[in-house]
Image (tube, coloured by chain):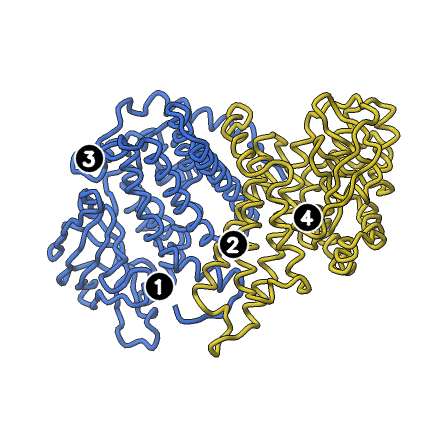
Amino acid sequence: MDLAFSPADEAFRTEVRQWLHARVPREPLPSLETADGFEAHRAWEAELAADRWSVVDWPAEYGGRDAGLLRWLVFEEEYHAAGAPGRVGQNGIHLLAPTLFAHGTEEQRARVLPPMARGEVIWAQAWSEPEAGSDLASLRARAVRTDGGWLLSGQKTWSSRAAFADRAFGLFRSDPDTAKPHQGLTYLMFALRAPGVRVRPLARLDGKPAFAELFLDEVFVPDEDVIGEPGQGWRIAMATAGNERGLMLRSPGRFLAAARRLEGLWRERGGPGSERDRVADALIGARAYQLFTYAAASRFLDGEAVGPESSLNKVFWSELDIALHETALDLLGPEGEPADTDWAQRYVFALAGPIYAGTNEIQRDIIAERLLGLPKGRR
Amino acid sequence: MRFLLDDGQRAFAASLDALLTAADPAGVVREWSRGDHASGRALWSRLARAGVFALAVPETYEGGLGPRPVELAVAFVELGRHAVPGPLVETVTAAVLLTGADPGIAERLLPVLASGERMATVAPAGAYALDGDAATLRLSWEPDGIRLSPGHGPVRPSLDPARRLTPLAPGGELLDAPTGQALTWARLATAAQALGVGLALLDRTVGHVRRRTQFGAPVGSFQAVKHRLADAKIALEFARPLVFGAALTLRPADAAAAKVAACEAAYTTARTALQLHGAIGYTAEYDLSLWLTKARALRTAWGDPHECRALVVSAADDRRW
């Protein structure tokens, strides 16, 4: 058992740190939930990609560095510690790309991944529907067979990044007659500017269009944009959902960097002992999450699959994120009220954590039933 | 970087688990609580033979296997899981204190701590020492150093009946023993023990809610019950890596962080365990009480949550995270 990274990993850390030190914008980019900010973040993705830092764990042929899981963790620690911009491409990079690596065709990987790595094509996820949130088995949007492809119709909602993104991936009901509702779903990719797609941006709590509703009316998708076998979408998507809750979506470096910023804020402003305890809890939580991830990564490198433990992760980081940012706003007092500060923006983002990627209630059910062995019951 | 217990460490945990499962610790705890130390001493000897106390004693002393903080944490999780009574953390702390002491004293006392021949207690002057009536080596941690206390005062019951609180008699020989790392080890061992206590509470409560039916269904099928247990599981599983991380770094702030997280997790789990057992859990005769009361006591032993959190934020340079 050890916590020491190899000299080669440490050399990688130094290289990352030096590159970020030279390149991270001195002034924060405008919010990526605005048209200007989205383009600025897209340009940052291109800058990262030019030196192959946008997807360090991917194979070199798609723009990565074959860096492996541990170096990805190192990269993320340095990235967040450097205060580098949020990643506008992360839905594609962390949700779609792993699915294509596992279930896509060689042709799909060659066509989709390099432009994703360069930020030329930004992806939105389109899973949720008005009547289906965490219960994906109740999806209704349809995919109907046509010559050379499929016609998509129906409504998707809470589609992250869709207000400004280029393409989306989602599940559609391709066989309405199956006995079980999670059968007969197909996983497809489609263009957000295709004929028949209407995108209605949805403002989140602070008024910024962080997600959108999609209205689809016989949108044509060629067969080459089906991921895996038609009808197998549920199984393929569940593998991605595990990924979303598990190792890749919220890297420990993000919370450690945020907890250190909070500690800095507390040192700068002072505060009663009760506030000091909350700052300590944020640090302890971030450290716990980092070490938990190191253990999970060690098991993964030993060949163990990421299982339902990813549900422990998801509840933990999402609650840590809110507690950390609440503490910051409380330390700021009335100065924490303006919505355009970095702390306020991060707070609003954190509030969504327990809702997306499978609500925390669903995650707690999974923990209780699959990790503790409690009997299934009515939800 | 491979942050996982190795096969030997896992086998050590399994062998202690087997030893303790066979030893009827519940009966031992109840006798210990009444001041009858015979079965507790016998168990202590067996734990010593398994190497538990030797892990805190350097190899240079007779019987020493250490210092091996990771294995010590492994052992203390098992001691907590099985509610083993006695001044366990204190004996480890005494071993660390004596490691830095005058060689003559260290040569004389460390081998008998490693072998289990003597059990030690340690407490700051004026505070209660744990199990001073059972310990045969009593160290008073005073501002000017560590003293060999000549005796103990009357026993006062603790909220945890298995913890017998005793003031130490003043005076005694002053040892030339720097206190150095002793508090870090005390907190590490307490955190690991608390983690074990929490794991046992969770395990027993899961078993109970699977069996217990109300309104025609196992209470464990109710979402309100499931979610409390899921939260307990989350808290314990995120305390675990802090405990082993602190064992690897032995930095004071890391041990303090581990203690906060493990003791809070164990205490939250105790509250959940009591609620989900209902009135059965509120009775002293039901074994759950052995862990319930210990979770409360460990929370304030060797640095309360406030003190440990203060160390985490004040020790930013030492913390290195």
Q: Amino acid at mark 4?
A: Ser
SS at mark 2? Answer: helix
How much space separates mark 1 and mark 4, taking CA atoms? 55 Å
Asked if the residue under mark 2 is in contact with the one under mark 1, i.e. CB atoms within 8 Å, the reply is no
* Residue in the foreground of this view, choosing between A266 and A354: A266
Q: Check chain identity for marks 4 and 2: say if they share one.
A: yes
* Residue A71 visible, this orientation: no
Instruction: State whether residue B224 is above or below residue B235.
Output: below
Chain A, hue in figure: blue
Q: Name which quarter of the figure residue A136 lies in.
A: bottom left
Residue found at x 11% / y 57%: A196
User: To which chain does the residue with label 4 belong?
Assistant: B
Q: Name which quarter of the figure residue B304 lies in.
A: top right
Mark 4 lies on residue: B158
Asked if the residue under mark 3 is in contact with the one under mark 2, i.e. CB atoms within 8 Å, the reply is no
Mark 3 lies on residue: A39
Of the numbered discs in the image, which one, if any, rests on residue B22? Answer: none
